[in-house]
């Protein structure tokens, strides 16, 4: 599990140049200061996590439960509440601000977000099926999946069969992305490569949990 994490908003993709004038594709993530609203500990909640909020929200638009929750913590209301699972919460306290400077340049991170929704898609686009031939008697079934079940036994289609359906709109995590730049003045994080989700979507960024283990194993 990670030991530090933060929430940001995907702005889009661009490119930067390194010291050897090589182009590096990066995703720009805006990370406004996040406020810790609640700390969950193993002895009281069964696990360790930070509940944070970001942005600003009009207090008149809150429910009584939400207003009471923020008031109890003494924290200004934000756009939403996000829970960040971390190993150790002893270094955090309610009301503390988490900024983009929590992650440093060159650090490896895991990024989690909800992927773009693609709508209803067939098996070739959704699952990468090859499809049927364009000739040799194949007629009006070039992009169809083919047979999907058995005959009298078991007289049904097994659960989990790869079939057409809604594509995207799922929680996706991309592992081991490099932080190319961490700009505390502009509250911007540049992450190498692509990040799931649409522009403006919320993304959770945490330090990579598998990078050290994989590197140690290679040695």
Image (cartoon, rainbow, N blue to C red):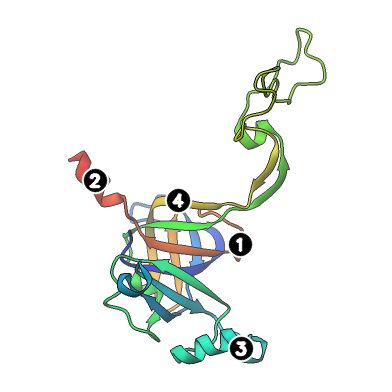
Can residue 196 be seen in the rendering of this structure? yes
The residue tagged 1 is: 199
The residue tagged 3 is: 64
Which of labels 4 and 3 is toward the front? 3
* Element marked by disc 1: loop
How packed is label 4: few (under 14 Cα within 10 Å), some, or many (20 or more)?
some
Above or below — where is 172 with respect to 92? Answer: above
Side (left or right) of 86 relative to 68 = left
Above or below — where is 85 with respect to 74? Answer: above
Q: CA distance from mark 4 to mark 1?
A: 17 Å
The residue tagged 4 is: 174
Q: Position of residue 30 (x, y in %)?
A: 50, 70
Nearer-N-terminus badge (3/1): 3
The residue tagged 2 is: 215
Side (left or right) of 44 relative to 71 = left
Asked whether the beta carbons under mark 3 and mark 1 sit within 8 Å of each other, the answer is: no
Q: CA distance from mark 3 to mark 2?
A: 49 Å
Q: Residue at x 67, y 28 (%)?
A: 157
Which of labels 2 and 1 is toward the front? 2
Asked whether the beta carbons under mark 4 and mark 3 sit within 8 Å of each other, the answer is: no
């Amino acid at each position: 599990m990670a030991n530090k994490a933060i929430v940001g908003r995907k702005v889009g993709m661009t490119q930067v140049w390194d010291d050897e004038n090589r182009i590096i594709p990066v995703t720009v993530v805006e990370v406004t200061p996040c406020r810790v609203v609640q700390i969950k500990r193993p002895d009281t909640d069964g696990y360790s996590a930070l509940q944070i909020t970001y942005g600003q929200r009009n207090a008149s638009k809150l429910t009584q439960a939400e207003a009471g929750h923020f008031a109890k913590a003494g924290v200004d209301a934000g756009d939403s509440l996000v829970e960040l699972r971390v190993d150790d919460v002893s270094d955090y306290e309610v009301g503390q601000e988490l900024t983009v400077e929590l992650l440093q340049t060159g650090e490896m991170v895991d990024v989690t977000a909800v992927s773009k929704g693609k709508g209803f898609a067939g098996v070739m686009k959704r699952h990468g099926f090859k499809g049927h031939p364009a000739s040799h008697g194949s007629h009006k079934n070039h992009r169809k999946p083919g047979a999907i079940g058995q005959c009298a036994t078991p007289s049904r289609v097994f659960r989990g069969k790869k079939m057409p359906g809604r594509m995207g709109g799922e929680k996706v995590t991309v592992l081991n992305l490099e932080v190319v730049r961490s700009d505390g003045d502009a509250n911007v994080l540049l992450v190498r490569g692509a990040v799931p989700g649409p522009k403006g979507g919320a993304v959770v960024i945490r330090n990579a949990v598998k990078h050290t283990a994989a590197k140690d194993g290679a040695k």
